[in-house]
């Protein structure tokens, strides 16, 4: 604990004023102005004393400079208590970014984020749970990159129109010898307990406010000391730093002149770029994070807020109940619209209802699969899976519905209307299948081939869950797709009683409901984590 120079009571770091405040006499001091008598000799210059608390359930460890800061529960597994270990001498980081976001601001930012997701359970808005945010300084390490040797960079020309629908891009290679250094542009957390899946989403931190480390900044907060070999992040940092290196090298006059003379631009992300880049750890630092966990049985969810920028990264499992209620309301609106249409258009047969339900069922399956693919792409940083929802699919779906109405309604020109409806369906349905459903199947297949290179435990867990879900999803979707296509054929070519058409329409809705339920459970499950077990050698999560 840092003591007040005036009265000897404990000092606490006040985020709002960025000053050390005495709990007794209320005097305020600049943190850097407080003399650090403990660390005057050479042996202790690179260390500081902290009190370690260890969770008996999962083995996670956090530290504090004040022994009176009793830790009531483990932030990583939600365990009821943490055991005081002993006074330790920990490594002294070179830099620290103090908290600038207060706890009240943190809670407001988190609530604002949760409100954006209407299908998240109300328990994640519970004030008692939100009060569980704890300020923790997480250990990070910055890295330097050094380029020395022969370099080959790929450049490309603007697209040239060479035909009615053809464009051509010419690529060039720039070669030379370079010596270049880039300092501390990449930082990575070095905590086994702080999942990379969250730390990446909280980034970036702004280095402008970084200060030399002083233990005073830890007063009133917890800290992690770092327990991951920083060399493990070498390949990850290399991939992250390479585009920055290429971009900076592209500012060299030689390359700028070559770009201007040949009307080309440097492609920073080209796989053909060959750069002899060597990565070296630079400085260890502490970055501020507001952290909260919510435990439910053998599952746990995390929420974190960047203590400097206020950026939020949270596991927000969807509430099946909320989604089911929304689905029932949406279904009731559609059913009501069909009933109103049947009342105002007496000639509208029951087969039309079956056809429209079948088309909407196919569209609903497509939308849910798109959300599934995009969820995986976003969570695992797979850009090819994070495609936007195609507007064309909506247009052709409306066309298919229009064709259904034409093909099933009576009128003076019944045969002509039926023929036109059939032609519209013949065009719209195959275009939906070839243009949208098949490419979506191809994207789904790519999930099986994803190879992760990061160290995130949550990312690996999401990939495992996605592959498990693929098997169940394929079976359910196949049965539903075949059934819906058969219903479209029945609508067009089989004469049934009205009640039979309605029963088949109800079956289409039931099949779509099963698909939706499977997707809801998947989306809810991937946001939850297994209980961590850091006290098991080689294990990050409990396998039970």
Image: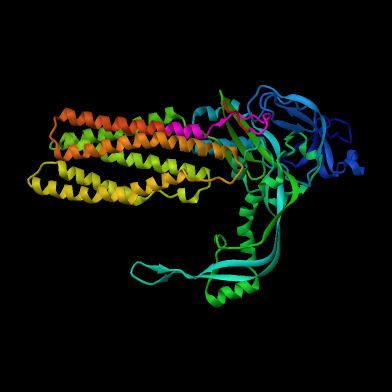
Could you say where residue 31 lies in the image, as x and y percent from the top left? 81, 42
13 vs 263: above or below: above
Could you say where residue 435 lies in the image, as x and y percent from the top left? 32, 51
* Location of residue 482 by image quarter: top left
The one nearer the camera, 483 or 111, is 483
Could you say where residue 117 lies in the image, as x and y percent from the top left? 48, 37
Left or right: 254 as drawn, with respect to 54: left
* Location of residue 528 by image quarter: top right
The one nearer the camera, 496 or 483, is 483
Q: Residue at x 69, y 35 (%)?
A: 135
Residue 522 belongs to the span the image colors magenta: yes
Left or right: 127 as drawn, with respect to 396: right
81 vs 240: above or below: above
Residue 437 belongs to the span the image colors magenta: no
Q: Residue at x 60, y 72 (%)?
A: 256
Q: Which residue is farthest right?
A: 41
Q: Residue at x 18, y 50 (%)?
A: 423
Location of the C terminus by quadrant is: top right
Protein image colouring: rainbow
Could you say where residue 38 lies in the image, as x and y percent from the top left? 89, 38
Location of the N terminus by quadrant is: top right
Q: Is residue 30 visible?
A: no
Q: Which residue is farthest left?
A: 412
Q: Is residue 124 visible?
A: yes
Q: Which residues are magenta?
A: 520-539
């Amino acid at each position: 604990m840092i003591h007040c120079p005036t009265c000897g009571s404990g000092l606490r770091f006040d985020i709002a004023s960025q000053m050390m405040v005495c709990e007794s006499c209320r005097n305020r001091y600049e943190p850097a102005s407080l003399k650090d008598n403990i660390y005057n000799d050479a042996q202790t210059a690179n260390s500081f004393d902290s009190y370690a608390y260890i969770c008996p359930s999962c083995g996670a460890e956090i530290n504090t400079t004040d022994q009176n800061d009793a830790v009531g529960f483990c932030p990583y597994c939600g365990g009821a208590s943490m055991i005081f270990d002993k006074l330790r001498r920990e490594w002294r980081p070179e830099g620290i970014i103090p908290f600038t976001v207060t706890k009240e601001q943190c809670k407001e930012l988190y609530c604002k984020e949760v409100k954006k997701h209407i299908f998240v359970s109300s328990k994640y808005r519970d004030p008692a749970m939100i009060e569980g945010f704890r300020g923790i300084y997480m250990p990070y390490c910055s890295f330097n990159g050094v380029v020395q040797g022969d370099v080959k960079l790929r450049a490309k020309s603007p697209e040239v129109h060479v035909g009615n629908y053809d464009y051509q891009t010419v690529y060039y290679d720039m070669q030379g010898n370079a010596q270049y250094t880039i300092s501390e542009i990449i930082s990575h957390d070095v905590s086994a307990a702080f999942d990379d899946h969250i730390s990446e989403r909280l980034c970036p931190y702004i280095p402008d406010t970084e200060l030399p480390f002083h233990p005073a900044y830890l007063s009133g907060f917890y800290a992690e000391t770092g327990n991951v070999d920083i060399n493990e992040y070498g390949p990850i940092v290399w991939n992250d730093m390479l585009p920055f290196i290429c971009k900076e090298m592209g500012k060299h006059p030689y390359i700028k002149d070559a770009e201007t003379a040949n009307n080309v631009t440097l492609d920073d992300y080209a796989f053909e770029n060959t750069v002899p880049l060597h990565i070296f750890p630079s400085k260890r630092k502490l970055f501020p994070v507001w952290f909260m966990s919510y435990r439910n049985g053998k599952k746990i969810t995390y929420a974190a807020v960047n203590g400097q920028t206020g950026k939020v990264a949270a596991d927000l499992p969807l509430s099946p109940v909320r989604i089911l209620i929304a689905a029932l309301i949406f279904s009731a609106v559609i059913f009501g619209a069909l009933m109103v249409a049947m009342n105002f258009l007496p000639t509208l047969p029951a087969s039309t209802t079956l056809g429209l339900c079948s088309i909407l069922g196919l569209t609903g399956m497509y939308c849910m699969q798109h959300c599934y693919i995009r969820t995986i792409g976003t969570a695992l940083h797979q850009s090819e899976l994070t495609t936007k929802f195609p507007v064309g699919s909506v247009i052709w779906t409306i066309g298919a519905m229009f064709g259904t109405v034409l093909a099933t309604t009576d009128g003076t020109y019944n045969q002509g209307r039926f023929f036109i409806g059939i032609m519209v369906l013949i065009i719209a349905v195959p275009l939906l299948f070839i243009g949208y459903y098949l490419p979506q199947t191809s994207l789904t297949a790519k999930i099986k081939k994803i190879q992760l290179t990061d160290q995130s435990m949550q990312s690996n867990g999401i990939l495992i869950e996605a592959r498990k879900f693929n098997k169940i999803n394929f079976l359910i979707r196949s049965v539903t797709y075949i059934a819906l296509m058969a219903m479209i054929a029945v609508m067009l070519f089989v004469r049934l009683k009205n009640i039979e058409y309605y029963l088949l329409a109800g079956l289409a809705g039931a099949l779509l409901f099963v698909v939706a339920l499977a997707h809801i459970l998947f989306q809810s499950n991937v946001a939850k984590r297994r209980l961590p077990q850091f006290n098991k050698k080689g294990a990050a999560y409990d396998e039970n």
